[in-house]
Image: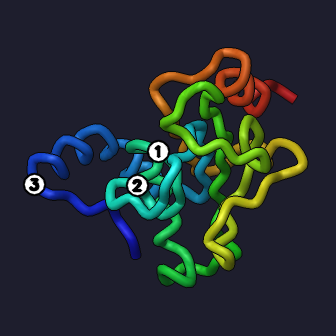
Amino acid sequence: ARYPNYASLAAFDRDWRKSRRNVLQVLCADAVYAVAYRAPSAGDSRTAACDVGGGTGYACQCYINRFQPLGPEAAASCRLYLYDDGAPEWAGCLKDARTHRRWSAWDPASQAWAPLDGPPPRPEGVYAGIGSTRLHPDFGDAAIRALMAPV
């Protein structure tokens, strides 16, 4: 399993304080819905292998690590969905035309994001909704509103 590496305990503590709520949520969730940006380099020691940025990425990676081939739970049970809300003008996010400003699902077999043709299944049961502090109102916010809209 891959977690970000830290040069000091203080750096780990700072990031853990920012992401612990999300991590604790995903460890108990049957499904995770994340709205965040994708980080430009999964090879960076501070970036989660799933290439989602910030504390949201750390929490997504903790969820991924529960499932085969990394963890003991069946890969078919992995229900991790990401809405890629990275700003096109920001150099700090990965600009992947396949996933940008659309929903994707994590594929445990390929350890990669698989773009969805539409929104993911509506949340039900025990799920976690996590994401970036700042979302674009016309995209990230709108994706959440559409997903949670009454049917």
Total marks drawn? Answer: 3
Mark 2 vs 3, N-terminal side:
3
Q: Which residue is mark 2?
A: 47
Mark 1 vs 3, N-terminal side:
3
Q: What kind of element bears circle 3?
A: helix
Say whether residue 122 is left or right of residue 61. Answer: right
- In what quadrant of the picture does the C terminus appear? top right
Say whether residue 104 is left or right of residue 49. Answer: right
> In this rendering, does residue 50 appear at all?
yes
Q: What kind of element bears circle 1?
A: loop
Q: What kind of element bears circle 2?
A: loop
- Residue 27 location in percent, x, y? 43, 59
Mark 1 vs 2, N-terminal side:
2
Asked if marks 2 and 3 touch (Cβ < 8 Å), the reply is no
Q: Which of the pair 12/31 is nearer the observer?
A: 12
- Residue 123 location in percent, x, y? 70, 44
Sort mark 3 into few (<14), some (14-19) or many (20+) by Cα contacts within 10 Å: few
Say whether residue 56 is left or right of residue 112. Answer: left
**From what the image shows, is residue 137 above or below residue 31?**
above
- Residue 79 location in percent, x, y? 66, 60
**Mark 2 vs mark 3: in front:** 2
Q: Which residue is mark 1?
A: 53
**From what the image shows, is residue 80 above or below residue 76?**
above
For badge 2, the amino acid type reads: Thr
Asked if marks 1 and 2 touch (Cβ < 8 Å), the reply is yes
> In this rendering, does residue 62 appear at all?
no
For badge 3, the amino acid type reads: Leu
* Residue occupying image coordinates x 10% and y 55%: 8
